[in-house]
Image: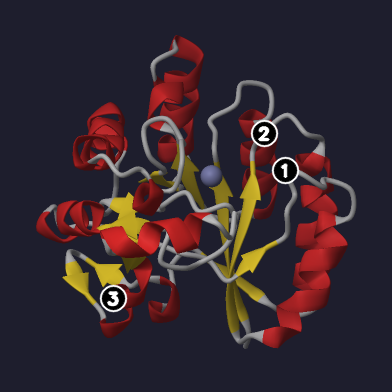
């Protein structure tokens, strides 16, 4: 049976994240929310994160400020702080593991991590979670569900990224989930090994492709 893992990035967003949580609860589904650390500073953001965790979803670290990808920052102190400050903001809400998702403009490549960031993740026991299905729902909310549904048969286990942001995209979530169900695809909360190049601090062989050495930065930034 094909599987799909749902991830919601860049929240929590009052007024939108509730809608996502209600939709998931109606269907008995569990997901992971990769939150931006600074969004937990407001009482509303914090309450939403607490509700998310209380309803059985996982909360992951999606950097403190969601700035440039960590491989492009060229400032080791900021690279480390983007991870550790967000982890401190999550505190005990981070569970059951230290899940981290880098910012990456939607693409997987050597811009995702600096050497410093990779060291922080491995020494801190993090699990880095990438994705396989990115449908540009925040820039092109129209039709994201159809784009995702078309690509689902490509893989036995996709990890989808969408965003609980006020773009209107989440209005398509109920219809999308109904279609996934009718395709016989099982929605699971776990992540496939192919999308976790660091697990509990242990790097896989593919990790070397995900951080840049200083001399490579200019060519990588030229792509974005
Ligand atoms: Zn993001």
Measured from the top left, where is residue 160 in percent x and y? Answer: 62, 63
Q: Along the line of sight, which residue is nearer the eye, 67 or 38? A: 67
Label 1, on which residue?
Answer: 138
Q: Sort mark 1 into few (<14), some (14-19) or many (20+) by Cα contacts within 10 Å.
A: some
Residue 70, percent across and down?
A: 36, 48
* Residue 14: % across, % down: 61, 21
Q: Residue 153 falls in which quadrant of the image?
A: bottom right
The answer to whether mark 2 and mark 1 are in CB contact below 8 A is yes
The residue that label 2 is drawn on is 165
At which x and y percent is residue 209? 36, 75
> Relative to the observer, which residue lies in front, 215 or 55?
215
- Judge from the rendering whether residue 13 lies leftward or rightward of residue 126; answer left or right: right
- The earlier-in-sequence mark between 2 and 1 is 1
Q: Earlier in the sequence, mark 1 or mark 3?
A: 1
* Pointer 3 local density, CA inside 10 Å: few below 14, some 14–19, many at least 20: some
Tell me the CA gap for discs 2 and 3.
32 Å
C-alpha span from label 1 to label 3? 29 Å
Q: Is residue 9 left or right of residue 81?
A: right
Secondary element type, mark 1 = loop
Q: Is residue 204 above or below residue 210?
A: below
Q: Which residue is mark 3?
A: 208
Q: Nearer the viewer, mark 2 or mark 3?
A: 3
Which SS class for mark 2?
Answer: loop
Vertical position of residue 62 compared to residue 222: above or below: above
Q: Residue at x 47, y 63 (%)?
A: 219
């Amino acid at each position: 049976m094909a599987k799909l893992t749902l991830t919601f990035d860049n929240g929590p967003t009052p007024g939108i994240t509730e809608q996502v949580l209600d939709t998931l609860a109606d269907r008995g589904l569990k997901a992971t929310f990769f939150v931006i650390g600074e969004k937990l500073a407001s009482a509303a953001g914090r309450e939403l994160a607490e509700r998310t965790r209380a309803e059985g979803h996982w909360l992951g670290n999606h950097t403190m400020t969601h700035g440039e990808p960590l491989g492009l920052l060229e400032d080791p102190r900021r690279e480390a702080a983007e991870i550790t400050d967000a982890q401190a903001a999550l505190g005990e809400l981070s569970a059951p593991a230290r899940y981290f998702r880098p910012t990456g403009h939607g693409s997987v490549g050597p811009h995702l991590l600096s050497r410093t960031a990779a060291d922080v993740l491995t020494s801190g026991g993090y699990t880095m979670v990438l994705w396989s299905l990115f449908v540009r729902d925040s820039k092109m909310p129209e039709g994201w569900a159809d784009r995702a549904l078309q690509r689902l048969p490509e893989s036995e286990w996709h990890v989808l990224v969408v965003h609980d942001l006020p773009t209107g995209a989440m209005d398509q979530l109920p219809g999308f989930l109904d279609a996934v169900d009718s395709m016989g695809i099982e929605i699971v909360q776990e992540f496939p090994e192919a999308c976790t190049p660091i697990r509990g601090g242990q790097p896989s062989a593919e990790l070397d492709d995900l951080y840049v050495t200083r001399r490579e930065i200019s060519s990588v930034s030229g792509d974005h």
